[in-house]
Image (cartoon, rainbow, N blue to C red):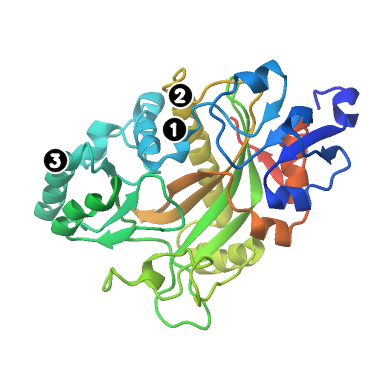
């Protein structure tokens, strides 16, 4: 551990507007204060517009300048196109659009329907001509919780959807890995996985992942027959009134996954390493350029993100697909099941303690 005893023993004054941090930050090395001017650490949910004051005051903050390059769905898709130039893949993709744009295997083919509508229409027709699956999910550029999202294979509908606000079109993961639930009939349900990422610095890149992940499940067996059935195609149930919310811890999930998929595909341990590689490549794409084209390196900055992903079957191989990255995510479930969660997060981000048992360094 390359930090001095004075830094380890120091009492850090913390200003936050986050109720969960107020409740669950219990480590003796942190003291909550009501005035940001008195704080050493500022951990807030609102986005900072100017970092100069925090830098001059030598405060630490929970945000990086230009981090919206990964938290905004439109910008994330653009940043991800740097993947090809960074990784020099030896083989080209059979899809001409994906190959020409340099899109990574871990992000669905994405179009901005404000600026790339013509290109999208051409590509849609190409897939029709090739008799390829043409199901798309249309997402608002900057909303969460599945708000205003649509799943469709109708070009006419897609062309009209941007009238309600800026949208992106992402190729729908039409062959997802499914999990069979004992009390449900059918092939299994869709699920997505949320990992917590901790970013300590940009240059050098210091990126950590919390190995305890979170799961969300659809409530109905997966099928492409009814694309407008929310409980078949979406997994966000905790904000919908009267919707059933399935809870499962990661240990139970890993056991079920290995039992159902570990023999014919890959065990979870192998899939997880591919997920961690994906996270590393995302941040490499987002930091290779100087600001404002990349996340800015700021000595006062630390950050906590949540990355949501699904698992796709591509050429009989499990391929993680990134859905989105969230700033100041809802960590209520993490705190409920693991009350020490924010203590671990703060120790890694602000006290430079990197040997927390549930946190893994994935920088390299």
Element assignment for label 2: loop
Q: Residues within 10 Å of mark 2 (few under 14, many from 20)?
A: many
- Quadrant of residue 361 in the image? top right
- Measuring from the top left, give residue 30's x and y in whole percent: 83, 38
Q: Nearer the viewer, residue 66 or 316?
A: 66
Q: Is residue 44 visible?
A: yes
Between discs 1 and 3, the one toward the N terminus = 1
Q: Which residue is mark 1?
A: 69
What's the mark number on residue 98?
none
Q: Residues within 10 Å of mark 3 (few under 14, many from 20)?
A: few
Residue 241 image point, x, y percent? 50, 73
N-term mark: 2 or 1:
1
Numbered circle sitting on residue 118:
3
The location of residue 263, given as percent across then percent down, is 50, 63
Task: Judge whether 315 appears above or below 102 on screen.
Answer: below
Q: Is 62 located above or below residue 297 in the figure?
A: below
Please tell me which residue lies in front, 5 or 254. 5
Q: Which mark is residue 294?
A: 2
| Residue 96 location (% of width, % of height) | 19, 38
Figure quadrant of residue 56: top right
Q: CA distance from mark 3 to mark 2?
A: 27 Å
């Amino acid at each position: 551990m390359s930090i001095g005893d004075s830094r380890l023993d120091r009492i850090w004054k913390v200003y936050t507007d986050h109720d969960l941090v107020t409740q669950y930050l219990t480590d003796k090395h942190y003291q909550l204060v009501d005035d940001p001017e008195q704080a050493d650490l500022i951990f807030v949910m609102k986005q900072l517009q100017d970092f100069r004051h925090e830098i001059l005051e030598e405060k630490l903050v929970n945000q990086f300048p230009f981090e919206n390059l990964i938290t905004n769905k439109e910008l994330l898709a653009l940043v991800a196109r740097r993947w090809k130039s960074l990784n020099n893949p030896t083989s080209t993709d059979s899809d001409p659009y994906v190959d020409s744009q340099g899109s990574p295997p871990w992000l669905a083919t994405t179009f901005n329907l404000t600026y790339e509508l013509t290109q999208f229409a051409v590509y849609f027709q190409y897939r029709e001509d090739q008799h390829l699956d043409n199901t798309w999910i249309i997402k608002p550029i900057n909303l969460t919780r599945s708000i205003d999202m649509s799943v469709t294979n109708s070009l006419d509908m897609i062309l009209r959807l941007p009238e309600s606000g800026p949208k992106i079109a992402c190729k729908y993961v039409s062959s997802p890995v499914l999990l069979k639930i004992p009390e449900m009939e059918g092939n299994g349900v869709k699920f997505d996985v949320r990992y917590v990422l901790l970013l300590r610095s940009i240059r050098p890149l210091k990126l950590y992942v919390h190995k305890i992940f979170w799961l969300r499940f659809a409530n109905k067996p997966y099928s492409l027959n009814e694309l407008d059935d929310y409980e078949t195609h979406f997994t966000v149930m905790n904000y919908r009134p009267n919707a059933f919310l399935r809870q499962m811890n990661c240990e139970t999930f890993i056991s079920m996954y290995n039992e159902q998929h570990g023999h014919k595909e890959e065990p979870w341990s192998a899939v997880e390493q591919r997920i961690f590689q994906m996270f590393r490549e995302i941040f490499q794409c987002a930091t290779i350029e100087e600001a404002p084209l990349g996340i800015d390196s700021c000595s006062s900055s630390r950050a906590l993100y949540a990355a949501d992903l699904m698992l796709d079957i591509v050429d009989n191989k499990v391929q993680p697909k990134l859905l989105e990255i969230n700033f100041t995510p809802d960590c209520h479930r993490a705190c409920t099941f693991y009350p020490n969660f924010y203590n671990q997060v703060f120790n890694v981000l602000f006290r430079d303690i990197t040997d927390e048992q549930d946190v893994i360094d994935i920088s390299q």
